[in-house]
Amino acid sequence: MCAVFSREILNLTWWPLFRDVSFYILDLIMLIVFFLDNFISCWESVALLLSYATYVLFMKFNSQVEGFVKGLTSRNQVVEVAETQPKVSPVPTEDDSKLSAKPRLQRGGSSASLHNSLMRNSIFQLMIHTLDPLSEGKFREKASILQKIAKKKCQVEDANGVVDKNLPNSSSVEVEVSPPLNGTAGQEGDAGDEDEEEDQPLSLSWPESSRKRFTYLFLLPIVFPLWITLPDVRKPKAKKFFPITFLGSISWIACFSYLMVWFAHQVGETIGITEEIMGLTILAAGTSIPDLITSVIVARKGLGDMAVSSSVGSNIFDITVGLPFPWLMFTLANGLQPVAVSSNGLFCAIVLLFIMLLFVIISIAACKWKMSKMLGFIMFLLYVVFLVVSVMLEDKIIVCPISI
């Protein structure tokens, strides 16, 4: 959904996906080990919660770790570049200086021009580093863009005061403010207008168009209680009540989640659908709607890596907090009695998740690490395949050959 509803094709980097998938795989392995005896004890629940605490602590130092890892991966490339640089003799002879001083620098060949050249290169690298401090694949693209901008306003003044615009190493570079790198200025203006509309406080005034009136009446039973009980922090006078809005939002989410589970259970019993299939389809989609909305919002703002991290990170939260926290509450309320769980078909379910993760990574790599609509449709197809195979496993149409 992020790829389909994003305003433009977004570039992705490998580090967020590698980091989150690694934690996700480790948490799945822990879950398999804890399910072996069909019981979840108190210390196992605590271990899963500590796993999430470790993930949060890791995210605190994510930038430092990312820079360290990327420095290790690019060390060989840096060494090769350094080795290919020509060596300059410390004390050149008079003949060498007469023949090679001017061609090696600029016309005039002064130390000041060398100083300016080094300074320009430093400023150029600083500009690239400011755009993406931990860039890897985007470096060449942004470097070429900045080089083209610099060439347009490049002015070279030699020792005689002659201006030469053809030389790449200029003594003075003037760079104007360029258009946005992603998209046109008009698109950014439209996006800014939409963001301003989204940031406006909620209004219950009657809409003008018929479509908006239908949406207004459809959402009014949900929006009206929220409008009464939660202060709208987008209003200047209500900003100081943000803790009430935060805690109240969590309470409303818990209330709506309880109602959704109850509705799904009653509908499943009426139609004759098992609880496992209802949880795999209806409840899984319903509980992922908040993640879907937030991921689409950040994708429309151009933050593709954040959207990917949100989708994988939500599964990490489900495994390491959503499951062990109720188990821990149950064990504490029942005198540390372990929780009975069923591990039938768990091995095949976990293997299916591993295969889906592998196909997701392959799909992103096949799309050249770009969040495009093609990638979105591939993800939809993978979800349909996962859903069909999971339902067939639950209905015993496909029998899991290995049981734990």
Image: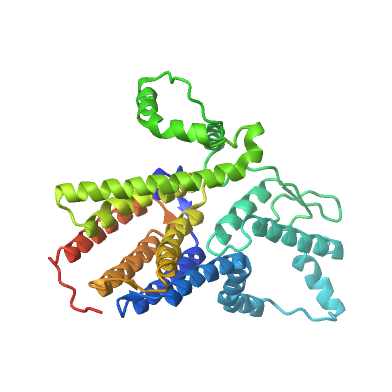
Q: Along the horizontal axis of the image, is 291 left or right of 247?
A: left
Q: Residue furthest left?
A: 397
Examine the rendered structure and indicate whether residue 323 appears above or below residue 248. below
Residue 182 seen anywhere in this rendered image of the structure = no
> Which residue is located at x 58 percent, y 62 percent?
135
Question: Can residue 227 be seen at all in this image of the molecule?
Answer: yes
Query: Which residue of the protein is positioned furthest toward the front in this rendering?
Result: 335
How far from the left and from the top, in percent, is residue 61?
A: 62, 68
The number of callouts visible is 0
Side (left or right) of 331 relative to 191 = left
Q: Nearer the viewer, residue 109 or 351?
A: 351
- Decide which of 106, 70 is in the foreground and name it: 70
Quadrant of the snapshot with the C terminus: bottom left
User: In the figure, 258 relative to 276: above or below?
Assistant: above
User: Looking at the picture, how far across and down is residue 56, in whole percent?
Assistant: 55, 65
Q: Position of residue 75 (x, y in %)?
A: 60, 77
98 or 121, which lies in front? 121
Q: On the image, which quarter does residue 79 sit in?
A: bottom right
Q: Residue at x 67, y 56 (%)?
A: 130
Please state if 87 lies on the left or on the right of 223 as rendered: right
Q: In the figure, is residue 127 to the left or right of 243?
A: right
